[in-house]
Image (cartoon, helix red, strand yellow):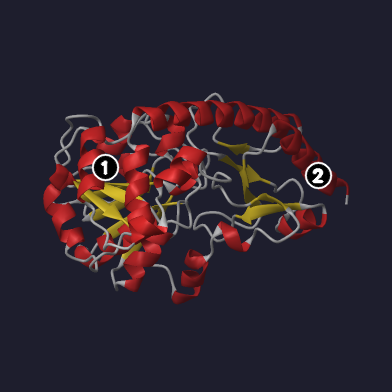
Amino acid sequence: MTPSLADEADLHHHGDADALPGLIDLAVNVRPCPPPWLAEALGTPATWVAYPDPAEARAKLAAWHGVNEACVLPTAGAASAFTLVARALATERATVLHPQFTEPEAALRRAGRPVRRLALRPPFTLDAAQVPADSDLVVVGNPTNPTGVLHPRAEITRLRAPQRVLVVDEAFMDFAGDAETALAPGGDLTGVLVVRSLTKLWGLAGVRSGYVVGDPALVARLANQQVPWEVSTPALRAMTACATPQAAAEAARIVAQVDADRAALSAALAAAGFPHYPVPPARAGAPFVLVDTASVGPGSVREPLASLGFAVRRGETFPGLGPSWIRVAVPDPATGHAFVAALASLRQR
């Protein structure tokens, strides 16, 4: 069903609004800062004088993913890519799987496209058979924000159908080491658009660096919607720098640490009796967990946690979730245990 206008405001809420000053920030899921080699790769003012040229970034990304250059489009972050999709594709029966990042639906609605929501229930397992057969566009996150669930590539593939465009938001796929990506080298990309982001793993939210890989005919339609020089030189230089063996090696180290820290947080939440997702030992692919705090009470624990020094991402702005849900960025183990202790203490209030 198409949401009412009253629901639309929720789609524009993002985690940075919950990260209040003075609190331990578990609301935003962006890495703290880019590594020195990447900061250096963004260039100096001397490199920013000329108008940006995406050719090198497109070529590097195409080689990295094993596709033709016509399959790649650099964008000003993943959010920009969703806006291009909404403007370029005249969908009449779009289906967005929730809970997920809300910008794809928000972009479709801004473009006047009708949207149907399909809300997955815990444990948020994808079943392609649930998607209406007449859907001409389907949007799914993998790994999904805010659930952290990594869907099998085979199930994602089942979402493809003739006369349908499949948009896969892989903004967090770097945290899964490309496990289950829809961008298998040499794979058929007909009717598929995969959106990637450098924001999360590399700490580049302010640079706005992302790209689309997919069906070249669809990519060309998206490109026609871009304004001239839409993607900045620093963003393009970041794409080039991150499509290298050096970046892959550093990403593997970061992901291993996130996996270990997430396991520690998950164990602490389980010991305290808080249901959370993804459910171990399921393969996760995100630097956060989704926690159900209904045992504390039916309302949101965000303000009580703030009084104890922790900022978390509220869950009720994600379609399919309610106020007892929170998304928690994975911290170091000591901070994670302190957070779980603070959350557990709310039961005694």
Q: Quickly name the residue at label 2.
A: 342
Residue furthest out toward the bottom: 5
- Residue 275 picture quarter: top right
Mark 1 and mark 2: span between their CA atoms? 41 Å
Element class at badge 1: loop
Instruction: Please provide percent x and percent y for residue 235.
Output: 36, 53
Residue at (55, 39) in percent of width and height: 287
Residue furthest out toward the front: 46
Instruction: Please provide percent x and percent y for residue 214.
Output: 20, 45
Q: Is residue 144 visible?
A: no
Instruction: Please provide percent x and percent y for residue 17.
Output: 60, 63
Q: What crowding class fits label 2: few (fewer than 14 Cα within 10 Å), some (14-19), or many (20 or more)? A: some
User: Looking at the rendered structure, which numbered label has been put on residue 235?
Assistant: none
Q: Is residue 77 left or right of residue 287?
A: left
Residue furthest out toward the right: 348
Element class at badge 2: helix
Q: Is residue 65 left or right of residue 11?
A: left
Q: Is residue 146 left or right of residue 131?
A: right
Q: 205 and 100: which one is in front?
A: 205
Q: Quickly name the residue at label 1.
A: 159
Q: 103 and 114: which one is in front?
A: 103
Residue at (82, 52) in percent of width and height: 308
Q: What crowding class fits label 1: few (fewer than 14 Cα within 10 Å), some (14-19), or many (20 or more)? A: many
Choose the circle earlier in sequence order: 1 or 2: 1
**Amino acid tagged 2:** Ala
Quadrant of the image containing the N terminus: bottom left
